[in-house]
Image (cartoon, rainbow, N blue to C red):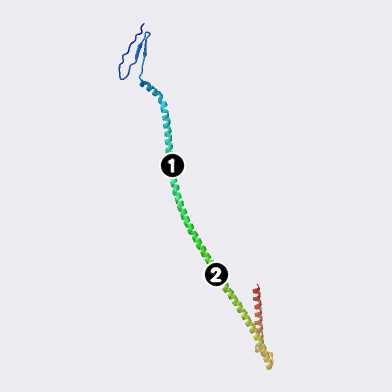
Amino acid sequence: MDIVKQQPVNEQTSGTTLPTVESTGNGIEAKRSYPAIFHAAAVSTFMLPFALLPYLLVRRQAVVLRKRIVLLEKDMGVLRNDLERTIAHQATIKSDLGRLKTATIESSKGWQDLRKQYNRHEADRHTTDEVVHSVLRKAQDETRHYSRTQGTVLRALGTSLGDIAAFMEEVELDLGLANGKQRDRRGIERLRTLALRMQTQENDKVAVEGSEETK
């Protein structure tokens, strides 16, 4: 049997092309022909996941990075606040150190002034002590000199009294005065006793002063 070929009539309907139908003796074999846009759409549909995968990965990484950036900005804000507080605290400490340094300098000057005053007072006290000691030594020397002079006078006076008593006794004997009671009434024995006492006391005083000077 001869193959009957039937040429399809191409009709333009809504921009589409109808498929071509071929007939053979054994039957009719239909052959459909699709436009290129369908092939592109199919390929695009197949390749779209592979094309979108890098974008999705990049988008995911971008979201993670954005979150990290937000956290870093928060941390930067906290660090900035801490830094500002630290700077303010350092400024306060610096001001306190300045005041402390000023107070230390003033205290050092005060201590130096007190030391100078103390040294002046010590020098004045030393000078005063030397003057007092000099006056005391002079007074002591004058006292000793007066004591020695007084002792010499007392000894001389005792000797003179003794001589007077002897002279009076000699006169009484020359005049022939009888009893000793009359001599005693005239004070000869009292003069001798007084002269002896003055000489004895002065000798004892000289001995005591000599022993004190030796010590």
Q: Nearer the viewer, mark 2 or mark 1?
A: 2
> Which residue is identified by label 1?
76
CA gap, disc 2 and disc 1: 74 Å
Residue drawn at (51%, 61%) of the image = 112
Residue projecting furthest to the bottom: 175
Q: Position of residue 136 (x, y in %)?
A: 58, 73
User: Does residue 121 appear left or right of residue 50 in this picture?
Assistant: right
> Which residue is identified by label 2?
127
Up/down of 33 relative to 158, above or below: above
User: Does residue 65 appear left or right of residue 206 in this picture?
Assistant: left
User: Does residue 16 appear left or right of residue 56 in this picture?
Assistant: left
Disc 1 residue type (three-letter): Met
Up/down of 184 relative to 138, above or below: below
Q: Earlier in the sequence, mark 2 or mark 1?
A: 1
Disc 2 residue type (three-letter): Thr
Element carrying mark 1? helix
